[in-house]
Amino acid sequence: MSLDSVLIIGGGLIGSSIARAAKAYGQAEKVYISDKSSSACDAIERLGFADGVAENSPELYASQADLIILCVPPGRIGEVAQQVIPVMKAGAILSDVGSIKGDVIKQIKPHLRDDIHFVPGHPIAGTEFSGPEAGFAEMFRDRWCILTPEEGVSTAATAALKKFWQGIGSDVAIMSPERHDIVLATTSHVPHLIAYTLVGTAVDMEEVTQSEVVKYSAGGFRDFTRIAASDPVMWRDVFLANKDATLEVVDRFIEDLSALKRAIRWQDGEALLEHFAKTRDVRRKIVDAGQDSAEPNFGRND
Amino acid sequence: MSLDSVLIIGGGLIGSSIARAAKAYGQAEKVYISDKSSSACDAIERLGFADGVAENSPELYASQADLIILCVPPGRIGEVAQQVIPVMKAGAILSDVGSIKGDVIKQIKPHLRDDIHFVPGHPIAGTEFSGPEAGFAEMFRDRWCILTPEEGVSTAATAALKKFWQGIGSDVAIMSPERHDIVLATTSHVPHLIAYTLVGTAVDMEEVTQSEVVKYSAGGFRDFTRIAASDPVMWRDVFLANKDATLEVVDRFIEDLSALKRAIRWQDGEALLEHFAKTRDVRRKIVDAGQDSAEPNFGRND
Protein backbone atom coordinates (compact mmCIF):
# COMPACT_ATOMS: atom_id res chain seq x y z
CA MET A 1 0.00 0.00 0.00
CA SER A 2 1.77 3.15 -1.16
CA LEU A 3 0.96 6.74 -0.25
CA ASP A 4 1.30 8.53 -3.54
CA SER A 5 -1.31 11.09 -2.67
CA VAL A 6 -2.50 12.46 0.67
CA LEU A 7 -5.40 14.88 1.15
CA ILE A 8 -5.53 16.99 4.32
CA ILE A 9 -8.94 18.50 5.01
CA GLY A 10 -8.53 21.52 7.28
CA GLY A 11 -5.18 23.33 6.91
CA GLY A 12 -4.85 24.78 10.41
CA LEU A 13 -2.11 24.22 13.00
CA ILE A 14 -2.24 20.40 12.89
CA GLY A 15 -3.31 19.90 9.24
CA SER A 16 -0.64 22.23 7.90
CA SER A 17 1.98 20.59 10.12
CA ILE A 18 1.08 17.13 8.75
CA ALA A 19 1.31 18.47 5.20
CA ARG A 20 4.69 20.07 5.87
CA ALA A 21 5.99 16.95 7.61
CA ALA A 22 4.73 14.56 4.89
CA LYS A 23 6.69 16.55 2.31
CA ALA A 24 9.74 17.22 4.50
CA TYR A 25 10.12 13.58 5.48
CA GLY A 26 9.15 12.18 2.05
CA GLN A 27 6.07 10.30 3.27
CA ALA A 28 3.87 11.27 0.30
CA GLU A 29 4.49 12.11 -3.33
CA LYS A 30 1.71 14.67 -3.43
CA VAL A 31 0.02 16.49 -0.56
CA TYR A 32 -3.23 18.35 -1.18
CA ILE A 33 -5.13 20.56 1.25
CA SER A 34 -8.71 21.68 1.36
CA ASP A 35 -9.84 24.41 3.73
CA LYS A 36 -13.17 26.18 3.97
CA SER A 37 -11.57 29.58 4.63
CA SER A 38 -10.29 31.51 1.63
CA SER A 39 -7.73 33.41 3.73
CA ALA A 40 -6.32 30.09 5.03
CA CYS A 41 -6.11 28.81 1.43
CA ASP A 42 -4.30 31.99 0.36
CA ALA A 43 -1.82 31.57 3.23
CA ILE A 44 -1.20 27.90 2.34
CA GLU A 45 -0.58 28.79 -1.31
CA ARG A 46 1.76 31.58 -0.30
CA LEU A 47 3.66 29.31 2.12
CA GLY A 48 3.97 26.78 -0.72
CA PHE A 49 4.05 23.51 1.22
CA ALA A 50 1.14 21.84 -0.61
CA ASP A 51 0.91 20.48 -4.17
CA GLY A 52 -2.62 21.78 -4.50
CA VAL A 53 -5.13 23.79 -2.48
CA ALA A 54 -8.90 23.53 -2.80
CA GLU A 55 -11.11 26.17 -1.20
CA ASN A 56 -13.95 24.44 0.56
CA SER A 57 -14.09 21.65 -2.04
CA PRO A 58 -12.36 18.54 -0.67
CA GLU A 59 -14.05 16.38 -3.34
CA LEU A 60 -11.66 17.98 -5.88
CA TYR A 61 -8.78 15.80 -4.65
CA ALA A 62 -10.66 13.14 -2.64
CA SER A 63 -11.05 10.70 -5.56
CA GLN A 64 -7.28 10.35 -6.12
CA ALA A 65 -6.08 10.29 -2.47
CA ASP A 66 -4.65 7.12 -0.91
CA LEU A 67 -5.06 8.71 2.50
CA ILE A 68 -7.45 11.41 3.63
CA ILE A 69 -6.90 12.97 7.06
CA LEU A 70 -9.71 15.07 8.50
CA CYS A 71 -8.16 17.94 10.48
CA VAL A 72 -11.32 20.00 11.09
CA PRO A 73 -12.76 20.81 14.54
CA PRO A 74 -14.53 17.77 16.05
CA GLY A 75 -17.92 19.47 15.69
CA ARG A 76 -17.64 19.59 11.87
CA ILE A 77 -16.27 16.11 11.28
CA GLY A 78 -19.57 14.34 10.44
CA GLU A 79 -20.52 16.90 7.83
CA VAL A 80 -17.08 16.73 6.15
CA ALA A 81 -17.07 12.91 6.22
CA GLN A 82 -20.48 12.88 4.50
CA GLN A 83 -19.06 15.16 1.81
CA VAL A 84 -15.89 13.20 0.94
CA ILE A 85 -16.60 9.52 1.63
CA PRO A 86 -18.85 9.06 -1.45
CA VAL A 87 -16.08 10.21 -3.81
CA MET A 88 -13.15 8.36 -2.19
CA LYS A 89 -11.42 5.72 -4.25
CA ALA A 90 -11.82 2.07 -3.26
CA GLY A 91 -9.11 0.83 -0.90
CA ALA A 92 -8.18 4.31 0.38
CA ILE A 93 -7.65 5.09 4.05
CA LEU A 94 -9.73 7.64 5.96
CA SER A 95 -8.32 9.04 9.21
CA ASP A 96 -8.61 12.09 11.42
CA VAL A 97 -6.75 13.92 14.21
CA GLY A 98 -9.66 14.56 16.57
CA SER A 99 -8.90 14.88 20.28
CA ILE A 100 -11.79 12.55 21.11
CA LYS A 101 -12.35 9.24 19.40
CA GLY A 102 -15.70 7.82 20.54
CA ASP A 103 -17.72 10.77 19.30
CA VAL A 104 -15.73 11.11 16.04
CA ILE A 105 -16.37 7.45 15.24
CA LYS A 106 -20.08 7.90 16.00
CA GLN A 107 -20.21 10.85 13.59
CA ILE A 108 -18.35 9.13 10.76
CA LYS A 109 -19.76 5.60 10.96
CA PRO A 110 -23.16 6.24 9.30
CA HIS A 111 -21.37 7.51 6.17
CA LEU A 112 -18.73 4.74 5.85
CA ARG A 113 -18.36 2.45 2.84
CA ASP A 114 -17.25 -1.19 2.95
CA ASP A 115 -14.45 -0.60 0.45
CA ILE A 116 -12.57 2.10 2.33
CA HIS A 117 -10.54 1.74 5.55
CA PHE A 118 -11.36 3.97 8.50
CA VAL A 119 -8.51 4.24 11.04
CA PRO A 120 -9.13 7.07 13.54
CA GLY A 121 -6.01 8.83 14.84
CA HIS A 122 -4.91 11.46 17.35
CA PRO A 123 -1.43 12.99 17.47
CA ILE A 124 -0.62 14.24 21.01
CA ALA A 125 1.07 17.44 19.86
CA GLY A 126 0.25 21.07 19.32
CA THR A 127 0.91 24.59 20.49
CA GLU A 128 -1.31 27.40 21.71
CA PHE A 129 -1.39 28.97 18.23
CA SER A 130 -3.85 28.37 15.38
CA GLY A 131 -3.88 28.60 11.59
CA PRO A 132 -1.63 27.43 8.73
CA GLU A 133 1.15 29.94 9.54
CA ALA A 134 1.58 28.36 12.99
CA GLY A 135 2.34 24.85 11.68
CA PHE A 136 5.81 23.31 11.34
CA ALA A 137 7.21 20.02 10.05
CA GLU A 138 8.78 18.91 13.36
CA MET A 139 5.49 19.13 15.28
CA PHE A 140 5.18 15.34 15.70
CA ARG A 141 8.81 14.39 16.32
CA ASP A 142 9.09 12.25 19.47
CA ARG A 143 5.39 12.82 20.24
CA TRP A 144 2.87 10.01 20.46
CA CYS A 145 0.13 9.39 17.93
CA ILE A 146 -2.72 7.14 19.06
CA LEU A 147 -4.65 5.07 16.50
CA THR A 148 -8.01 3.55 17.47
CA PRO A 149 -9.11 1.17 14.67
CA GLU A 150 -12.22 -0.85 15.42
CA GLU A 151 -12.10 -4.64 15.27
CA GLY A 152 -12.28 -5.98 11.74
CA VAL A 153 -10.48 -3.04 10.14
CA SER A 154 -7.77 -4.08 7.65
CA THR A 155 -4.49 -4.60 9.49
CA ALA A 156 -2.67 -3.53 6.32
CA ALA A 157 -4.45 -0.17 6.42
CA THR A 158 -3.60 0.33 10.09
CA ALA A 159 0.01 -0.65 9.38
CA ALA A 160 0.22 1.82 6.47
CA LEU A 161 -1.10 4.66 8.61
CA LYS A 162 1.25 3.70 11.44
CA LYS A 163 4.16 3.80 8.97
CA PHE A 164 3.06 7.26 7.82
CA TRP A 165 3.05 8.65 11.38
CA GLN A 166 6.34 6.98 12.22
CA GLY A 167 7.73 8.42 9.00
CA ILE A 168 7.01 11.96 10.20
CA GLY A 169 8.67 11.28 13.56
CA SER A 170 5.90 9.98 15.83
CA ASP A 171 5.76 7.04 18.15
CA VAL A 172 2.51 5.17 17.52
CA ALA A 173 0.23 3.51 20.11
CA ILE A 174 -2.91 1.53 19.34
CA MET A 175 -5.81 1.36 21.82
CA SER A 176 -9.60 1.29 21.97
CA PRO A 177 -11.54 4.54 21.48
CA GLU A 178 -12.99 4.22 25.01
CA ARG A 179 -9.54 3.93 26.58
CA HIS A 180 -8.26 6.83 24.47
CA ASP A 181 -11.06 9.07 25.68
CA ILE A 182 -10.49 8.49 29.39
CA VAL A 183 -6.68 8.73 29.06
CA LEU A 184 -6.93 12.00 27.16
CA ALA A 185 -9.58 13.40 29.51
CA THR A 186 -6.94 12.95 32.22
CA THR A 187 -3.83 14.16 30.40
CA SER A 188 -5.28 16.84 28.16
CA HIS A 189 -8.98 17.70 28.28
CA VAL A 190 -9.38 18.33 32.02
CA PRO A 191 -6.02 20.19 32.23
CA HIS A 192 -7.30 22.52 29.51
CA LEU A 193 -10.69 22.96 31.19
CA ILE A 194 -9.00 23.81 34.48
CA ALA A 195 -6.62 26.28 32.84
CA TYR A 196 -9.53 28.02 31.09
CA THR A 197 -11.42 28.14 34.39
CA LEU A 198 -8.55 29.52 36.45
CA VAL A 199 -7.72 32.25 33.94
CA GLY A 200 -11.38 33.25 33.93
CA THR A 201 -11.54 33.27 37.73
CA ALA A 202 -8.49 35.55 37.95
CA VAL A 203 -9.82 37.93 35.33
CA ASP A 204 -13.14 38.20 37.16
CA MET A 205 -11.70 38.88 40.65
CA GLU A 206 -12.99 42.29 41.71
CA GLU A 207 -10.38 42.55 44.46
CA VAL A 208 -7.47 42.20 42.03
CA THR A 209 -7.03 44.34 38.92
CA GLN A 210 -6.30 42.81 35.51
CA SER A 211 -3.04 44.75 35.35
CA GLU A 212 -1.93 43.13 38.62
CA VAL A 213 -2.78 39.69 37.23
CA VAL A 214 -0.62 40.48 34.19
CA LYS A 215 2.29 42.04 36.16
CA TYR A 216 2.65 39.24 38.68
CA SER A 217 1.84 36.34 36.35
CA ALA A 218 5.40 34.97 36.58
CA GLY A 219 4.42 33.57 39.98
CA GLY A 220 2.68 30.63 38.28
CA PHE A 221 -0.36 32.04 36.52
CA ARG A 222 1.30 32.58 33.14
CA ASP A 223 1.69 28.82 32.50
CA PHE A 224 -2.08 28.49 32.70
CA THR A 225 -2.63 31.33 30.26
CA ARG A 226 -0.59 29.56 27.61
CA ILE A 227 -2.84 26.49 27.74
CA ALA A 228 -5.93 28.68 27.98
CA ALA A 229 -4.91 30.47 24.77
CA SER A 230 -5.58 27.36 22.66
CA ASP A 231 -8.29 27.40 19.98
CA PRO A 232 -11.62 28.00 21.84
CA VAL A 233 -13.84 26.46 19.11
CA MET A 234 -11.88 23.23 19.07
CA TRP A 235 -11.92 22.95 22.84
CA ARG A 236 -15.63 23.68 23.08
CA ASP A 237 -16.18 20.77 20.70
CA VAL A 238 -13.83 18.51 22.67
CA PHE A 239 -15.62 19.06 25.99
CA LEU A 240 -19.06 18.61 24.46
CA ALA A 241 -17.97 15.44 22.65
CA ASN A 242 -16.07 13.85 25.54
CA LYS A 243 -18.67 14.79 28.12
CA ASP A 244 -18.74 11.65 30.25
CA ALA A 245 -15.00 11.13 30.66
CA THR A 246 -14.41 14.86 31.22
CA LEU A 247 -17.06 15.12 33.92
CA GLU A 248 -15.74 11.99 35.64
CA VAL A 249 -12.18 13.31 35.84
CA VAL A 250 -13.35 16.81 36.83
CA ASP A 251 -15.37 15.32 39.69
CA ARG A 252 -12.36 13.43 40.99
CA PHE A 253 -10.29 16.60 40.71
CA ILE A 254 -12.86 18.57 42.71
CA GLU A 255 -12.89 15.85 45.38
CA ASP A 256 -9.09 16.04 45.65
CA LEU A 257 -9.14 19.83 45.71
CA SER A 258 -11.74 19.74 48.50
CA ALA A 259 -9.47 17.45 50.53
CA LEU A 260 -6.58 19.92 50.14
CA LYS A 261 -8.89 22.82 51.02
CA ARG A 262 -9.82 20.97 54.18
CA ALA A 263 -6.15 20.39 55.01
CA ILE A 264 -5.49 24.13 54.59
CA ARG A 265 -8.52 25.09 56.70
CA TRP A 266 -7.48 22.71 59.49
CA GLN A 267 -3.78 23.63 59.13
CA ASP A 268 -2.84 20.02 58.44
CA GLY A 269 0.65 20.55 57.02
CA GLU A 270 1.47 16.87 56.95
CA ALA A 271 -1.42 16.05 54.61
CA LEU A 272 -0.35 18.86 52.27
CA LEU A 273 3.29 17.81 52.25
CA GLU A 274 2.42 14.18 51.59
CA HIS A 275 0.34 15.18 48.60
CA PHE A 276 2.91 17.62 47.16
CA ALA A 277 5.90 15.32 47.52
CA LYS A 278 4.46 12.62 45.24
CA THR A 279 3.98 14.97 42.31
CA ARG A 280 7.70 15.71 41.80
CA ASP A 281 8.35 12.16 40.71
CA VAL A 282 5.89 12.39 37.80
CA ARG A 283 7.72 15.45 36.50
CA ARG A 284 11.01 13.57 36.45
CA LYS A 285 9.44 10.67 34.54
CA ILE A 286 8.01 13.04 31.91
CA VAL A 287 11.41 14.67 31.39
CA ASP A 288 13.12 11.24 31.27
CA ALA A 289 10.58 10.08 28.65
CA GLY A 290 11.53 13.02 26.41
CA GLN A 291 8.03 14.52 26.66
CA ASP A 292 9.27 17.82 28.11
CA SER A 293 12.36 19.94 28.50
CA ALA A 294 14.25 19.86 31.80
CA GLU A 295 15.31 23.47 31.33
CA PRO A 296 14.05 25.47 34.31
CA ASN A 297 11.05 27.55 33.25
CA PHE A 298 11.20 25.77 29.87
CA GLY A 299 14.38 27.72 29.18
CA ARG A 300 12.82 31.14 29.64
CA ASN A 301 15.04 32.28 32.50
CA ASP A 302 16.24 35.40 30.89
CA MET B 1 22.69 54.73 53.07
CA SER B 2 25.25 52.44 51.45
CA LEU B 3 25.13 48.68 51.12
CA ASP B 4 28.64 47.64 51.92
CA SER B 5 27.61 44.34 53.37
CA VAL B 6 24.58 42.11 52.69
CA LEU B 7 23.73 38.93 54.57
CA ILE B 8 21.49 36.34 52.93
CA ILE B 9 20.01 33.82 55.35
CA GLY B 10 19.00 30.68 53.42
CA GLY B 11 21.12 29.99 50.34
CA GLY B 12 18.57 28.11 48.23
CA LEU B 13 17.16 28.95 44.79
CA ILE B 14 16.14 32.54 45.66
CA GLY B 15 18.79 33.35 48.28
CA SER B 16 21.66 32.14 46.11
CA SER B 17 20.25 34.05 43.12
CA ILE B 18 20.12 37.29 45.14
CA ALA B 19 23.72 36.72 46.26
CA ARG B 20 24.88 36.05 42.70
CA ALA B 21 22.95 39.07 41.37
CA ALA B 22 24.20 41.44 44.09
CA LYS B 23 27.79 40.57 43.14
CA ALA B 24 27.21 40.42 39.38
CA TYR B 25 25.45 43.79 39.29
CA GLY B 26 27.71 45.44 41.89
CA GLN B 27 24.95 46.11 44.41
CA ALA B 28 27.01 45.13 47.47
CA GLU B 29 30.68 45.15 48.37
CA LYS B 30 30.44 41.97 50.38
CA VAL B 31 27.77 39.25 50.28
CA TYR B 32 27.60 36.70 53.08
CA ILE B 33 25.36 33.64 53.28
CA SER B 34 24.21 31.54 56.18
CA ASP B 35 22.45 28.22 55.62
CA LYS B 36 21.49 25.55 58.11
CA SER B 37 22.46 22.70 55.80
CA SER B 38 26.14 21.80 55.63
CA SER B 39 25.81 20.35 52.13
CA ALA B 40 24.26 23.64 50.92
CA CYS B 41 27.15 25.55 52.55
CA ASP B 42 29.66 23.26 50.85
CA ALA B 43 27.97 23.87 47.50
CA ILE B 44 27.96 27.65 48.01
CA GLU B 45 31.65 27.63 48.91
CA ARG B 46 32.44 25.49 45.88
CA LEU B 47 30.41 27.75 43.57
CA GLY B 48 32.28 30.72 45.00
CA PHE B 49 29.71 33.49 44.67
CA ALA B 50 29.76 34.54 48.36
CA ASP B 51 32.39 36.39 50.35
CA GLY B 52 31.73 34.24 53.37
CA VAL B 53 29.55 31.25 54.32
CA ALA B 54 28.32 30.48 57.83
CA GLU B 55 26.81 27.09 58.59
CA ASN B 56 23.70 27.62 60.65
CA SER B 57 25.15 30.66 62.41
CA PRO B 58 23.72 33.82 60.86
CA GLU B 59 24.81 35.86 63.92
CA LEU B 60 28.41 35.48 62.62
CA TYR B 61 27.81 38.14 59.95
CA ALA B 62 24.57 39.74 61.21
CA SER B 63 26.32 42.44 63.27
CA GLN B 64 28.14 43.95 60.29
CA ALA B 65 25.39 43.70 57.63
CA ASP B 66 23.66 46.83 56.27
CA LEU B 67 20.94 44.60 54.82
CA ILE B 68 19.79 41.15 55.92
CA ILE B 69 17.41 39.24 53.67
CA LEU B 70 15.67 36.21 55.11
CA CYS B 71 15.31 33.59 52.36
CA VAL B 72 14.17 30.65 54.48
CA PRO B 73 10.80 28.84 54.09
CA PRO B 74 7.94 30.95 55.54
CA GLY B 75 7.43 28.42 58.35
CA ARG B 76 10.93 29.09 59.77
CA ILE B 77 10.99 32.85 59.48
CA GLY B 78 9.96 33.72 63.06
CA GLU B 79 12.63 31.51 64.58
CA VAL B 80 15.38 32.95 62.34
CA ALA B 81 14.25 36.53 63.01
CA GLN B 82 14.47 35.89 66.74
CA GLN B 83 18.01 34.64 66.26
CA VAL B 84 19.43 37.54 64.20
CA ILE B 85 17.51 40.68 65.22
CA PRO B 86 19.23 41.01 68.63
CA VAL B 87 22.69 41.13 67.02
CA MET B 88 21.86 43.42 64.06
CA LYS B 89 23.60 46.77 63.94
CA ALA B 90 21.55 49.91 64.53
CA GLY B 91 20.15 51.43 61.34
CA ALA B 92 20.37 48.21 59.32
CA ILE B 93 17.54 46.97 57.08
CA LEU B 94 15.80 43.64 57.60
CA SER B 95 13.86 42.15 54.69
CA ASP B 96 12.66 38.80 53.41
CA VAL B 97 11.45 37.12 50.22
CA GLY B 98 8.43 35.25 51.61
CA SER B 99 5.53 34.50 49.25
CA ILE B 100 3.05 35.74 51.87
CA LYS B 101 3.41 38.98 53.73
CA GLY B 102 0.71 39.17 56.41
CA ASP B 103 1.89 36.04 58.19
CA VAL B 104 5.60 36.86 57.83
CA ILE B 105 5.03 40.27 59.41
CA LYS B 106 3.08 38.64 62.26
CA GLN B 107 6.00 36.27 62.90
CA ILE B 108 8.70 38.92 62.80
CA LYS B 109 6.99 41.81 64.62
CA PRO B 110 7.35 40.52 68.19
CA HIS B 111 11.14 40.41 67.76
CA LEU B 112 11.63 43.82 66.11
CA ARG B 113 13.80 46.61 67.52
CA ASP B 114 13.09 50.33 67.16
CA ASP B 115 16.53 51.02 65.71
CA ILE B 116 16.35 48.68 62.72
CA HIS B 117 14.19 49.06 59.59
CA PHE B 118 11.90 46.19 58.62
CA VAL B 119 10.81 46.30 54.93
CA PRO B 120 9.18 43.01 53.86
CA GLY B 121 9.71 42.00 50.21
CA HIS B 122 8.67 39.40 47.68
CA PRO B 123 10.33 38.92 44.28
CA ILE B 124 7.88 37.34 41.79
CA ALA B 125 10.41 35.01 40.22
CA GLY B 126 11.59 31.45 40.51
CA THR B 127 11.83 28.12 38.78
CA GLU B 128 10.70 24.61 39.69
CA PHE B 129 14.18 23.74 41.01
CA SER B 130 15.58 24.11 44.53
CA GLY B 131 18.98 24.58 46.17
CA PRO B 132 22.03 26.82 45.66
CA GLU B 133 23.08 25.11 42.40
CA ALA B 134 19.75 26.09 40.79
CA GLY B 135 20.19 29.85 41.33
CA PHE B 136 21.39 32.35 38.73
CA ALA B 137 22.12 36.08 38.64
CA GLU B 138 19.49 36.96 36.01
CA MET B 139 16.61 35.48 38.04
CA PHE B 140 15.05 38.88 38.79
CA ARG B 141 15.63 40.71 35.52
CA ASP B 142 12.35 42.23 34.26
CA ARG B 143 10.45 40.54 37.09
CA TRP B 144 8.50 42.42 39.73
CA CYS B 145 9.51 42.67 43.36
CA ILE B 146 6.79 43.78 45.78
CA LEU B 147 7.72 45.64 48.98
CA THR B 148 5.16 45.94 51.79
CA PRO B 149 6.53 48.37 54.42
CA GLU B 150 4.11 49.25 57.20
CA GLU B 151 3.22 52.88 57.86
CA GLY B 152 5.90 54.70 59.80
CA VAL B 153 8.82 52.75 58.40
CA SER B 154 11.73 54.94 57.31
CA THR B 155 11.22 56.04 53.70
CA ALA B 156 15.00 56.11 53.30
CA ALA B 157 15.20 52.42 54.19
CA THR B 158 12.42 51.55 51.75
CA ALA B 159 14.14 53.63 49.07
CA ALA B 160 17.48 51.87 49.70
CA LEU B 161 15.90 48.44 49.39
CA LYS B 162 14.03 49.52 46.27
CA LYS B 163 17.35 50.67 44.78
CA PHE B 164 18.92 47.31 45.62
CA TRP B 165 16.18 45.37 43.81
CA GLN B 166 16.22 47.73 40.85
CA GLY B 167 19.98 47.34 40.76
CA ILE B 168 19.66 43.60 40.22
CA GLY B 169 17.13 44.09 37.42
CA SER B 170 13.71 44.14 39.09
CA ASP B 171 10.77 46.44 38.74
CA VAL B 172 9.58 47.39 42.22
CA ALA B 173 5.96 47.84 43.38
CA ILE B 174 4.87 48.95 46.84
CA MET B 175 1.55 47.86 48.35
CA SER B 176 -0.05 46.81 51.62
CA PRO B 177 0.55 43.28 52.96
CA GLU B 178 -3.19 42.54 52.71
CA ARG B 179 -3.36 43.52 49.06
CA HIS B 180 -0.19 41.54 48.32
CA ASP B 181 -1.68 38.41 49.84
CA ILE B 182 -4.91 38.44 47.83
CA VAL B 183 -3.09 39.38 44.58
CA LEU B 184 -0.59 36.57 45.05
CA ALA B 185 -3.28 34.08 46.09
CA THR B 186 -4.77 34.76 42.65
CA THR B 187 -1.65 34.84 40.49
CA SER B 188 0.52 32.31 42.27
CA HIS B 189 -0.75 30.41 45.31
CA VAL B 190 -4.00 29.05 43.91
CA PRO B 191 -2.39 28.21 40.52
CA HIS B 192 0.18 26.15 42.42
CA LEU B 193 -2.47 24.47 44.58
CA ILE B 194 -4.47 23.56 41.48
CA ALA B 195 -1.42 22.21 39.67
CA TYR B 196 -0.50 20.06 42.67
CA THR B 197 -4.08 18.81 42.88
CA LEU B 198 -4.41 17.95 39.20
CA VAL B 199 -1.12 16.08 39.07
CA GLY B 200 -2.22 14.09 42.13
CA THR B 201 -5.62 13.33 40.59
CA ALA B 202 -3.99 12.02 37.40
CA VAL B 203 -1.52 9.87 39.30
CA ASP B 204 -4.33 8.35 41.36
CA MET B 205 -6.66 7.47 38.44
CA GLU B 206 -7.09 3.71 38.52
CA GLU B 207 -8.42 3.68 34.96
CA VAL B 208 -5.30 5.29 33.53
CA THR B 209 -1.78 3.97 34.13
CA GLN B 210 1.08 6.25 35.24
CA SER B 211 3.00 5.36 32.10
CA GLU B 212 0.07 6.60 29.99
CA VAL B 213 -0.01 9.85 31.94
CA VAL B 214 3.71 10.28 31.24
CA LYS B 215 3.54 9.28 27.55
CA TYR B 216 0.66 11.55 26.62
CA SER B 217 1.58 14.48 28.87
CA ALA B 218 2.34 16.73 25.88
CA GLY B 219 -1.43 17.15 25.50
CA GLY B 220 -1.42 19.74 28.29
CA PHE B 221 -0.64 17.88 31.51
CA ARG B 222 3.13 18.47 31.43
CA ASP B 223 2.76 22.23 32.05
CA PHE B 224 1.05 21.43 35.35
CA THR B 225 3.80 19.03 36.39
CA ARG B 226 6.42 21.76 36.08
CA ILE B 227 4.58 23.98 38.54
CA ALA B 228 3.81 21.02 40.77
CA ALA B 229 7.52 20.18 40.95
CA SER B 230 8.24 23.30 43.03
CA ASP B 231 9.57 22.98 46.58
CA PRO B 232 6.86 21.13 48.60
CA VAL B 233 7.96 22.43 52.00
CA MET B 234 7.83 26.05 50.89
CA TRP B 235 4.40 25.61 49.33
CA ARG B 236 2.99 23.84 52.35
CA ASP B 237 4.05 26.85 54.42
CA VAL B 238 2.57 29.28 51.89
CA PHE B 239 -0.87 27.66 51.90
CA LEU B 240 -0.97 27.38 55.68
CA ALA B 241 0.16 31.00 56.10
CA ASN B 242 -2.11 32.52 53.44
CA LYS B 243 -5.11 30.43 54.42
CA ASP B 244 -7.91 32.98 54.11
CA ALA B 245 -6.99 34.46 50.74
CA THR B 246 -6.20 31.02 49.29
CA LEU B 247 -9.51 29.54 50.41
CA GLU B 248 -11.42 32.54 49.06
CA VAL B 249 -9.86 32.29 45.60
CA VAL B 250 -10.20 28.48 45.54
CA ASP B 251 -13.89 28.79 46.35
CA ARG B 252 -14.43 31.19 43.47
CA PHE B 253 -12.49 28.85 41.20
CA ILE B 254 -14.67 25.90 42.21
CA GLU B 255 -17.82 27.97 41.56
CA ASP B 256 -16.54 28.82 38.08
CA LEU B 257 -15.55 25.22 37.39
CA SER B 258 -19.00 24.07 38.47
CA ALA B 259 -20.57 26.50 36.00
CA LEU B 260 -18.44 25.07 33.18
CA LYS B 261 -19.28 21.52 34.30
CA ARG B 262 -22.94 22.41 34.07
CA ALA B 263 -22.42 23.85 30.57
CA ILE B 264 -20.75 20.60 29.49
CA ARG B 265 -23.47 18.46 31.06
CA TRP B 266 -26.23 20.47 29.35
CA GLN B 267 -24.22 20.72 26.11
CA ASP B 268 -24.29 24.52 26.22
CA GLY B 269 -21.57 25.25 23.65
CA GLU B 270 -22.22 28.96 23.64
CA ALA B 271 -21.51 29.35 27.36
CA LEU B 272 -18.23 27.44 26.96
CA LEU B 273 -17.13 29.46 23.94
CA GLU B 274 -17.92 32.76 25.65
CA HIS B 275 -15.79 31.76 28.62
CA PHE B 276 -12.86 30.44 26.55
CA ALA B 277 -12.69 33.41 24.19
CA LYS B 278 -12.00 35.95 26.95
CA THR B 279 -8.93 34.12 28.23
CA ARG B 280 -6.86 34.58 25.04
CA ASP B 281 -6.67 38.30 25.61
CA VAL B 282 -4.96 37.92 28.99
CA ARG B 283 -2.25 35.79 27.41
CA ARG B 284 -1.49 38.50 24.87
CA LYS B 285 -1.23 41.13 27.62
CA ILE B 286 1.21 38.98 29.61
CA VAL B 287 3.43 38.50 26.56
CA ASP B 288 3.22 42.23 25.73
CA ALA B 289 4.24 43.07 29.31
CA GLY B 290 7.39 40.95 28.93
CA GLN B 291 6.25 38.51 31.62
CA ASP B 292 6.39 35.49 29.30
CA SER B 293 7.84 34.30 26.03
CA ALA B 294 5.63 34.34 22.94
CA GLU B 295 7.47 31.30 21.58
CA PRO B 296 4.93 28.54 21.01
CA ASN B 297 5.31 25.92 23.74
CA PHE B 298 7.86 28.24 25.41
CA GLY B 299 10.22 27.42 22.56
CA ARG B 300 10.23 23.68 23.14
CA ASN B 301 8.86 22.70 19.72
CA ASP B 302 11.61 20.34 18.83
Image: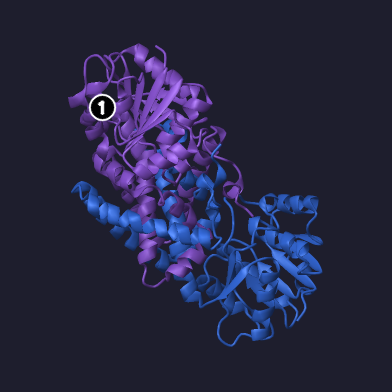
Chain colours: A purple, B blue
Q: A221 or A233, which is in the foreground? A: A233
Residue, x 54% and y 65% (percent of image)? B99
Query: Which corner quadrant of the image does residue A81 belong to?
Result: top left
How far across and down, in percent of the image, does residue A73 sit?
A: 31, 39
Measured along the vertical axis of the image, is residue A44 above or below residue B283?
A: above
How far across and down, in percent of the image, does residue A167 sit?
A: 49, 22
**Is residue B206 at all visible to an observer of this figure?**
no
**Is residue B225 at all visible to an observer of this figure?**
yes
Q: A135 or A163, which is in the foreground? A: A135
> Residue under mark 1: which chain is it in?
A
- Using a 10 Å C-alpha cutoff, classify the residue at mark 1 as few (fewer than 14 neighbours), some (14 to 19) or many (20 or more): many
How far across and down, in percent of the image, does residue B48 sit?
A: 80, 54
Measured along the vertical axis of the image, is residue B165 above or below residue A235?
A: below
Looking at the image, residue B138 sits to the left or right of residue A291; the answer is right
Looking at the image, residue B9 sits to the left or right of residue A215; the answer is right
Residue, x 55% and y 71% (percent of image)? B104
Q: B89 or B231, which is in the foreground? A: B231
Residue, x 67% and y 65% (percent of image)? B169
Badge 1 element: helix
Q: Quadrant of the N terminus of chain B?
A: bottom right
Measured along the vertical axis of the image, is residue A147 above or below residue B296?
A: above
How far across and down, in percent of the image, does residue B301 sit?
A: 54, 39
User: How many numbered discs, if any?
Assistant: 1
Q: A111 or A226, which is in the foreground? A: A111
Residue, x 40% and y 20% (percent of image)? A5
Type of the residue with mark 1? Val
Q: Which residue is mark 1?
A: A84
